[in-house]
Amino acid sequence: MSEGDIQKAVDLYLDMGTTGVHTGTGASADRNATLFSDDDVRDAIPARFDRLIGDPEPPGFPGMSEWLSGAINFQPAEEVEESIEELTQSGNDPLYRPPDDLNTPGTYQEAMKKAKDSRKWLLVNIQASDEFGSMLLNRDIWSHETVKQIIQSAFVFFQRDRASSQGSTFASNHNITSFPVVCIVDPRTGRKVKQWAGDKFRGPLSATDMLSDFMGENPYGSSPVPSRASLTDTSSGVSSPRNSEVVQSITIPDTPGLPIAKKAKETPPLEMPTDLPTLGSPDEVRVAIRLSNGQKKQVSFRDSNSLHVIQQWVSSIEYLGPSKFQVRMSHPPKTLDISPSTLETISTAGVKGALLVVVLVATEDED
């Protein structure tokens, strides 16, 4: 009405007086009082509890959901969680159960005597119930069939927890502070000849290799030898037995004025056998052979092959005459008859799955 003119709006207001102004009394006030009177307020909708699906009402107030009931009745984890010691020692979980079929009962001294009488190394595993690595050894290593066969054939197994009197005494006597640990002890002297941390056994294959390697290098009754990693090579001026063999085969040509080296008359190497099976053949037998340079090879033979096939294979691979080496089985420790006249076969000799070790032998030079 004032068309944006403030002065005109003020004049109009003054001209109208109080006729169109509501002061909060009269009809407007009566209407507000009527709207907000208690008589006109609607009653609250009554609460209703019901269940669409599920079991009968759980304990608690009516209409409590299963989730809420479970949350109220929740027990802290520390009250229901089983300790590693309970899993490993009580055998509650079969996955982590100790290897009772391998473990030697009784005292450590009794285990030592048993190993000495049976001419086997003593394999000691000291565990820690609060270390998960101990459970992994039980689950993955000591329960594996191949590992068990190796242990039963060449070792007496002794497993104890570090908290036990036997375990703590062994750890103290041999200055062991990290667990779990695996040791090999010479039962004739009580000396610890090998020690591995538990995490070195990363799987059954790793454990099989390490135990087989020790057996191959240290047949029971011999003095444990240093690892091949500690042997010096030709660059340091000292040659290994294999390198010495190579040096012996070098000859100096006839040169006037120079002495002529004495040539060794050696039997030439044999040719590689041709009657080897293909992988997966029904008559295939796999044998591990450790060469004289420390390399280990997995070789397939036929179970009907004569043991002479091993001599042929080694002679060809090593490029050595048959008189320059022997092949020995780690356990039971013995030298195999691999000559052409042998009557034993791969099957009858029991070399399936065994570790065979190539040993160089010294021979006198012939004129």
Image (spheres, grey):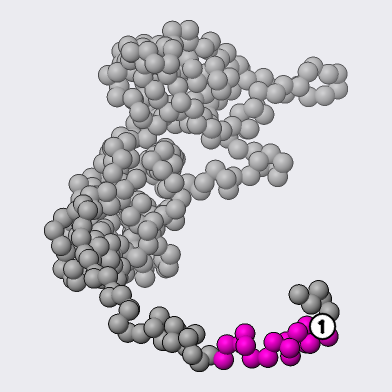
Instruction: Judge whether residue 129 is colored magenta.
Output: no
Please name whichever residue, 29 or 68, is drawn nearer the observer in this view of the structure.
Answer: 29
Left or right of 291 in this view: 106: left
Dot 1 crowding, Cα within 10 Å, few <14, some 14–19, many 20+: few
Say which quarter of the image contains residue 45: bottom left
Q: Residue 96: percent from the left, percent from the top? A: 28, 52
Where disc 1 sits, the SS reads helix
Left or right of 174 in this view: 95: left
Q: What residue does disc 1 label?
A: 8
- The disc labelled 1 sits on which kind of residue? Lys
Q: Residue 76: percent from the left, percent from the top? A: 29, 71
Q: Residue at x 40, y 25 (%)?
A: 287
Left or right of 21 in this view: 145: left
Range drawn in magenta:
6-23
Residue 24 visible in the shown view: yes
Q: Residue 89: percent from the left, percent from the top? A: 23, 60
Total tally of numbered discs in the picture: 1
User: Please, is residue 355 above or below residue 24 in the view?
Assistant: above
Q: Residue 115: percent from the left, percent from the top? A: 25, 50
- Viewport quadrant of the C terminus: top right
Seen from this angle, which residue lies furthest top?
A: 274
Q: Residue at x 48, y 86 (%)?
A: 27
Left or right of 214 in this view: 170: left
Say which quarter of the image contains residue 6: bottom right
Q: Residue at x 27, y 75 (%)?
A: 43
Residue 342 visible in the shown view: no
Q: Residue at x 64, y 27 (%)?
A: 246
- Viewport quadrant of the N terminus: bottom right
Please name whichever residue, 225 or 3, is drawn nearer the observer in this view of the structure.
Answer: 3
Please name whichever residue, 280 or 56, is drawn nearer the observer in this view of the structure.
Answer: 56
Seen from this angle, which residue lies furthest right?
A: 257
Which secondary structure class fits the magenta region best?
Answer: helix
